Amino acid sequence: MRFLRSHVILYGLFLIVNIGLLWLFFASCIFKLFGFAVFVLIYFVIFNVIFLHPKAYPIRYLLPGVTTFVALLIFPLVYTIYVSFTNLGTGHYLSRQDVQTLLLSETIQPEDGLSFFYEVGYRSDRPSNPYALILFQSSHDRIVYTAILPKLDSIDSKTPIQLKEIKLSPLFDTPQDWLRHKQYEPVSKRWKIKNRQYLKKVKLFFPKSMNMPKGIVLSLVHIHRFAQQTPKYRLIDSEKLKDQITGIIYTHNARSGFYENKKGDRLLPGFTTFIGIRNFGKLFTDPRIIGPFAKVFIWTNLWALFTVFLTFSLGILLSLFLQNQNLSGRAFYRIMLIIPYAIPFFISVLIWKGLLNTDFGIVNNVVHNVFGIRVPWLDLPLLAKMSCLLVNLWLGYPYMMLISTGILQSIPAQIYEVANLDGIGKIRQFFSLTLPMVMSAIAPLLVGSFAFNFNNFVGIYLLTGGGPPMIGAQTPAGETDILASYTYRLAFEGGAGNDFGFAAAIAILIFFIIGGLSLINFKIFGFMKEETT
Amino acid sequence: MRPQKKQIKHVIKAVLFHLLLLLILSVILFPCYYIVMTSFRSAAALSTDIWPSSVSWENWKYVLGLQYYDAELSQIRYPDFPILKWLWNSIKVSSLTAILVVLLSTSGAYAISRFRFRFKRRLMITLMIFQMFPVMMAMVAIYLMLDTIGQYIPSFGLDTHNGLILIYLGGTPFFMWLIKGYFDSIPPSTEEAALIDGCTRWQTFYHVLLPQSIPILCVVALIIFIQTFADFILPSIILKSQDKLTLAVGMRFFIEGKFTTRWGQFAAASVLGSIPIVVIFMLINKYIVSGLSAGATKE
């Protein structure tokens, strides 16, 4: 076999990818991302099988496209399925381990703990340790504690600084005097406020020689005070948390996602927990949810149906007009009529939102001049729905027009000639001849358009934001919300917090509906008939 | 009927048709006309004007990032929203996405078009079905995914353009199918000749098929460009800092409730943002039609 340059490149790439995958695998193990590591391993195996197995030659070509697809679409899909079985959302964002760590790091100031006022002095001739700290309980104390602080940005809260006990001689009236005596210039209160983020990192401890109770660490609790802080909770039985002051024990409740005591009081924040099919159950059993959800579902279907019907009707009508051979300037009309489709969606929808604005939109200005009233196009439920449909009609008819034109052109003209000879009227020709032929070709595209509009988030959300709010709905549902926008608002705009778990459940449901539709579409219309090469 | 009468009838019909079409056209295109006019309207003009009573360039100055006169505050100032930057962001993200997605999809399209292998049909259908899962539904997952990636590789995390483009790269199956459709219409005879002459499959792909299909790949890239440019959902979830927004998200943010004060500027921004897309669209629209109805029409 000749050793071509392309062989070198191929084997080189093969080697590089393998090395890369192995490195990724080990890196993710180190970072404890075991789920990801498993995926990488599986991909590693598949990759090598595909490249080494002679029969799998064609699949090599599919690898780049399919890899990104699986990584960036399938993986989120799987994760969304997982999320739909949890209670992820506001108040339940961290894992139980993380919440436990968080709660254990909470501190309080014990009532009988040590507490000091403090002053800071600055010396410019000591660049690496320019600050001195002095702690005192009252400004006439004779016993004070001092410490030397390093440069502000090198203060590390993990390295406590040692305190020294000093007996002030009667010469010094106040701690500031002592500072000045030591050549330190006392800082102002404004300085303390300005640099409090660094002061907060200062941790002070007493050396063993001072006979203080063990383990006391002082930190900034107030802009003017350093005080002793202890952790609020202590871990017992490696699972439960005990409040140090009240002695109440909190255990984690996997069902509710909180640490709770016997009475049922909860500690915030909560953690994410597996709640099984409760999200789906909520969908079908909670009356506050079913009502709005059913309404949204019905409207979503109607919306998609009417959109397809309206856009197709206008589209095919216009393309029929333009089929007329005798009409000059057809190309001009065609180009001009496509313009609404060419303008980016979000721009057109936002423009319409402005045009239909009740008080300032030009539509209402014209209506006002003619009829004397202003119509709340986007504020009343029925009108809002109509407005959405009309705007979508404006946006979508060119697409239907384009594909109808393509199909109409493939219908041989003889059929019409024969029909004319037979004396069949134009209108009947349309319904009995043209329409059935167009339908058989265009039906899969119509179903595709239905699926697209079923999820046409942009069309609704940018125009009405979901529409006038439904009265009495517990979740943020609007009159023009479709499932997609409802889900989005639930996940990202919830007033009582975001419920990602529930939103994920709805998302899965929508996917099944759309997927099912598409599958039927493919089966019925024979997508991808096996070609004979 | 006598020939002249028939001719007159034809002329009348033609005139009627033209009138009807022009009427429909003017109703449909009125918003476009109105927006263009509004972008030149000064703040002092009435909103009911069909023809602006006073022409001003202030809105355009705002959109282009130049100093302008703010009628509300009666002062000359710099615009507070970086509209031109948003436009550039959109163009940048859309172009990169277009190029990368085409690169990733082409080889897959070649495999589906030119090879026969087991599970081919089922694989394609599965890919298409799963692609129907609108990316928007996995928004939580994508958000968390980018968050995690961002912790390890900051330049690909949330609020970055790289992260956004990364997510767009998942949309390959549809374009694989589109490019496959175009490949199918190129007769394989040249490739078969090359194969007989001793070329490997890869060489026929790279040296024979690709050069022939460059125009088609350009068209697909432009389609992806248009689609990405108009996308609103993903950028609104992923991008947060004002500087990084794409035009789609930025405009929404820009107009949030402030239709009275910002309408003129919004109009100018709309025109600016639409023109490149409309032009591109017009250039490739016949390819779009043939691609979309491939298989539906009898050639």
Image (spheres, coloured by chain):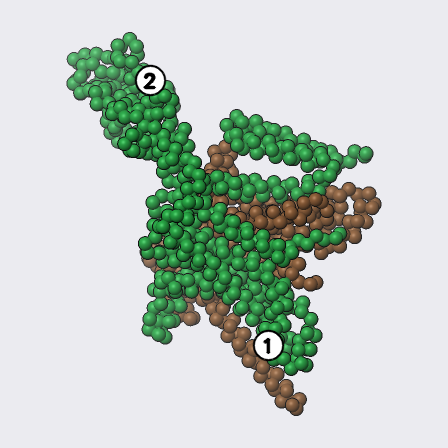
Chain colours: A green, B brown
What is the tally of numbered marks visible in this picture?
2
Asked whether A378 or B152 is in front, the reply is A378
Q: Chain of mark 2?
A: A
Tell me residue A28's x, y (percent).
Answer: 54, 29
Outermost residue on the right side: it is B197
Q: Residues within 10 Å of mark 2 (few under 14, many from 20)?
A: many
Q: Amino acid at mark 1?
A: Arg
Disc marking residue A428: 1
Outermost residue on the bottom side: it is B2
Asked whether A42 or B66 is in front, the reply is A42
Residue at image x 29%, y 30%? A262
Is A361 rendered above or below residue A157? Answer: below
Outermost residue on the front side: it is A285
Q: Tell whether B246 sits left or right of A406.
A: left
- Classify the position of the N terminus of chain A by image quarter: top right
Tell me residue A347's x, y (percent).
Answer: 47, 58
Are dots 1 and 2 in contact, CB under 8 Å? no
Q: Tell whether A143 sits left or right of B127.
A: left
Q: CA distance from mark 1 to mark 2?
A: 95 Å
The kind of secondary structure element at disc 2 is strand
Q: Chain of mark 1?
A: A
Residue at image x 29%, y 13%? A214
Q: Residues within 10 Å of mark 1 (few under 14, many from 20)?
A: few
Tell me residue A61's x, y (percent).
Answer: 68, 42
Residue at image x 36%, y 30%? A252
Disc 1 or disc 2, which is closer to the eye? 1
Quadrant in which residue A254 is drawn: top left
What residue would you read off at disc 2?
A: A161
Asked whether B138 or A327 is in front, the reply is B138
Is A57 rendered above or below residue A161? Answer: below
The kind of secondary structure element at disc 1 is helix
- Can residue A215 be seen in the rendering of this structure? yes
